[in-house]
Amino acid sequence: MRVIAGSAKKRLLKVPPGWKGRPTADRVKEAIFNILGNLVIDSNFLDLFAGTGNVGIEALSRGARRAVFVEKDPRAAGTIVQNLRLSGLDSGSRVIAKDVFRALDELAKEEKIRGQSFNIVFLDPPYGRGFEVPVIGKVLDLALLTPGGLIIAESSKRENLPDQISGLPLVRQERYGDTLISFYK
């Protein structure tokens, strides 16, 4: 696993020993960022179910102003911190080692105080557990997405994500092997 483009291009990223997570494949990550293009530059990026931090680190490398990573597994969260240091991208970032729903509640309070929200929210929950719709709904209920912002959900191609979540329409879907990438805007 590596950073594909930007200031940390070709940096290898660590995976916790014995970790059973499923990082976003490089070809899927590259396709996502090709679709996003310049939307990443100067964005506030939220990486939920962040695993190794692979996607959020790619966003920082490609010019995101700030990234917040949420990962419940403490070993994986520690690895995100290491990967941020290894890639030299730790200054514009934060790692929250909590359950995604509790982390979103905490972020909503903090972001309201700061007067900020996220331009891009990426989530890659464990496949087949039905996290996508409730997590996207919570992000929207808590006003964590900027107006005109984008939510990207990675799921199994067997998942049937709705055409709309809490009024936010599905604008694009792409399949890469077993992976389905859904864009809500």
Image (cartoon, grey):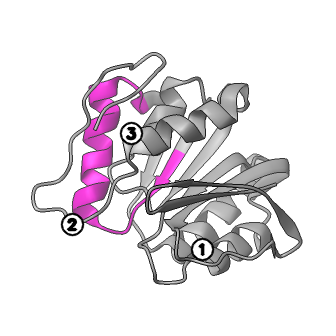
**Helix or strand or loop: what does disc 3 sit on?**
helix
Residue name at image x 68 percent, y 46 percent: 120
Please state the horizontal and vertical placement of residue 111, each as a whole percent of the image.
70, 54
Please state the horizontal and vertical placement of residue 91, each as a whole percent of the image.
45, 29
**Most foreground residue, 75 or 132:** 132
Foreground disc of the pair 3, 2: 3
Which residue reaches farthest bottom? 129
Q: Which amino acid type corresponds to the residue marked 1 in the rendered image?
A: Glu
- 150, above or below 49, in the image: above
| Res 147 visible | yes
Determine which residue is flagged by label 3. 26
Q: Earlier in the sequence, mark 1 or mark 3?
A: 3
| Res 42 visible | no
Say which quadrant the N terminus sits in.
Answer: top left
Determine which residue is flagged by label 1. 132
The circle on residue 17 is none
Question: Which residues make up the magenta segment?
Answer: 68-90
Q: Quadrant of residue 67?
A: top right
- 183, above or below 164, in the image: above
Determine which residue is flagged by label 2. 20
Residue 20 part of the magenta-drawn span: no
In the image, taking residue 41 as reference, residue 124 lies left or right, namely left
